[in-house]
Amino acid sequence: MEFNEAVFVGSFYDMAQIPRTGFAQIAFAGRSNVGKSSLINRLLNRKNLAQVAKRPGKTRALNFYEINRHYYFVDLPGYGFARVAKEEQTTWRKLIDSYLEQTRNLQGVVHIIDSRRGLQEDDLSLIEYIGFPQRKILWVLSKSDKLSANQKAAVYRDTLNQLQCSPKELIFFSALDGTGVSELKKLVSEMLRK
Ligand code: GDP
């Protein structure tokens, strides 16, 4: 499935504000700077749509995109910024927690991991509170263009071991050279159909 009809719906800071259409949703999560906006833009065949999520004040919100008039892609706030105060981390966590807990029609989460760093402590805690394996997660190793073939093989093996997931649930992605774009579209389409 192509995701050609994408419209930015809004930025929401509170579960009481989010749209109540009942559309199936896919959430996108990852540490700040992992390449989440670039990935979403690539998936939507758009140059700058996800940039709205980066405007001042919006990085701490749930940013909703309506896709093909039937679905929502939800860009979750990026986490893991050492400079962010504890208080803000708590607010962030509460928002994500309530989103994950209250969204009945969440079909799956695309969790983006920087392929140069592999899984970090805060990635693991996110996985824990997403509630894997009850909740479907697709893992994406981003910025794969920055790695050599050997480095790719090593990070793939290590991440697979740590996650104990199936190789079908872990893919490489590069917004720069297009690695993984069509595979990601296919896998997200499958999550939406389930
Ligand atoms: P976000 O904070 O997770 O939304 O990350 P962005 O999409 O804004 O990307 C953060 C930085 O990484 C930017 O400088 C991007 O140009 C760069 N970046 C994103 N995706 C890729 C990629 O696939 N390859 C490379 N080499 N750089 C990337």
Image (spheres, rainbow, N blue to C red):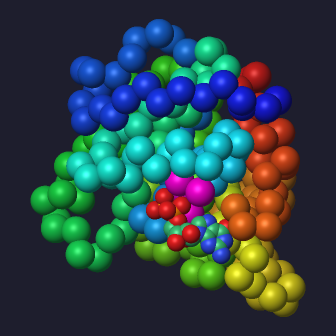
| Image point (45%, 56%), residue name | 126
Nearest the eye: 123 or 189: 189
- Residue sticking out furthest to the top: 21
User: Residue at 57% across / 81% down in the picture?
Assistant: 117
Residue 170 in percent (x, y) is at: 75, 59
Instruction: In this rendered view, identify the residue nearer to me: 189 or 4.
Output: 4
- Where is the N terminus found, in terms of image quarters? top right
Q: Is residue 127 visible?
A: no
Percent x, y of residue 157? 78, 77
Examine the residues drawn in magenta and state their main secondary structure: helix
Asked which quadrant contains residue 26, the reply is: top right
| Drawn side of residue 103 relative to residue 166, left or right | left
| Magenta-colored span | 34-38
Depth check: give the residue in front, 61 or 177.
Answer: 177
Q: For residue 150, say whether it is visible.
A: yes
- Above or below, 160 relative to 101: below
Q: Quadrant of ligand 1?
A: bottom right
Q: Is residue 41 above or below residue 63?
A: below
Residue 172, given in percent of the width and then of the height, sits at 77, 65
Q: Is residue 69 magenta?
A: no
Residue 175 lies left or right of residue 101; in this view the side is right
Residue 158: image quadrant is: bottom right
